[in-house]
Image (cartoon, helix red, strand yellow):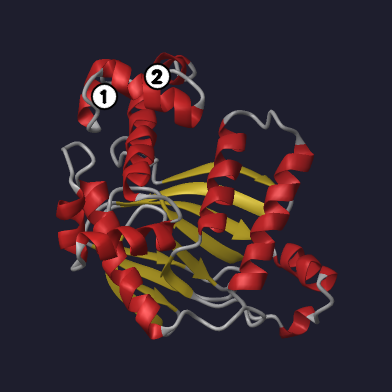
Amino acid sequence: MALPTSDLPRRRFLGATGGVRLSLVTDPAGLAEAPPSDSVRVCIHAGPPVYALCRHGSAQHKGTVIFGDVDIIPAHTTAAWELKGTDVDLVITIDGALLCRVVQDAGWDPRRLEIRSRFQARDARIEHIGWALKAEMDSGYPSGPLYLESLAEGLAACLVYNHSSAAREPVAPRRAFAARRLRDATAFIEANLGRPLSLADIACVSGLSVSQFTVQFRQSIGVPVHQYLIHRRVDRAAELLRDGRLSINQVAMEVGFCHQSHLAKHMRRILGVAPSDVRDRTS
């Protein structure tokens, strides 16, 4: 659900529970800096694609950041971003006490735990948990503290088991190269949600044949290309509906659906609500 960059406050605190705190942070083009923190910070990109040079301590990485990319900044580490456009991130801070509890439950020594720095990583579990936390906080905590605490524990476990000194070995170079080509494809999809797209168009951006691309995309993302595209269009439509500036039919056309009923069909299937319900919840 890529968030529009207009009319967003620079930092909006969303809530805190169970050892995690959430904020939605918007940075304009230029240099953005963050001082060291006692907590680990997870940044999930939530806006349109933007080119950035990122630094975590002495490590750095540059490239186009796309929706769902995850940066992980270890505790006591400075961070800086040189941005070519407006950047929007869901920033989650995870207390050390929560991480220690997860490590101890696994029978490890928390003094030996080292959270790894990550740039533009893809981790579907972290992304899903982050959006679930945001949705619960945005809607006023309807599911109660147990649900939020479970999400916080799950997020901490993802960091420990997949992004720490206790994690498995990194992905082999051959697969990492394929992932970079798929990144180009997903960035192309994000930038062109409102126009008709063909498999050939997207595969061409990735540098793969259509058959190679469809197989590698599904292996990397977990769903076929057309399902991913429809989900992204529905998510973008939901954000535009919440913004309230366009009619439902205008929103449908803006995100690439043929008409209002086409949007409604897919929104009910994916989100379980009608477009009018999404708009009414914010009015």
Which image quadrant: the N terminus?
A: top left
Residue 180 is situated, as x and y percent measured from the top left of the image, at 30, 71
Residue in the picture at 50% in, 54% down: 91
As drawn, 92 above or below 135: below
Mark 1 and mark 2 in contact? Answer it, CB < 8 Å: yes
The local crowd at label 1, few if under 14, some if 14 to 19, many if 20 or more residues have their Cα within 10 Å, is: many
Tell me what residue is drawn at x 75 percent, y 62 percent.
Answer: 98
Image position of 84 with respect to 130: above or below: below
Residue type at mark 1 is Ala
Asked whether 59 or 190 is in front, the reply is 190
Determine whether 271 is above or below 86 in the image. above
Q: Mark 1 points at which residue?
A: 252
Which corner quadrant of the image does residue 256 belong to?
Answer: top left
- Residue 172, quarter of picture: bottom left
Q: Which residue is drawn at 38% across and 70% down?
A: 80
Label drawn at residue 275 = 2
Q: In this view, does 166 lie to the left or right of 37?
A: right
- Alpha carbon separation for disc pair 1 and 2: 9 Å
**Would you say residue 234 is visible in this rendering?**
yes
* Residue at position x 50%, y 76% in the image: 117
In this orientation, which residue lies closer to the viewer: 109 or 266? 266
Viewport quadrant of the C terminus? top left
Q: Where is residue 21 in the image (x, y as percent from the top left)?
A: 62, 51
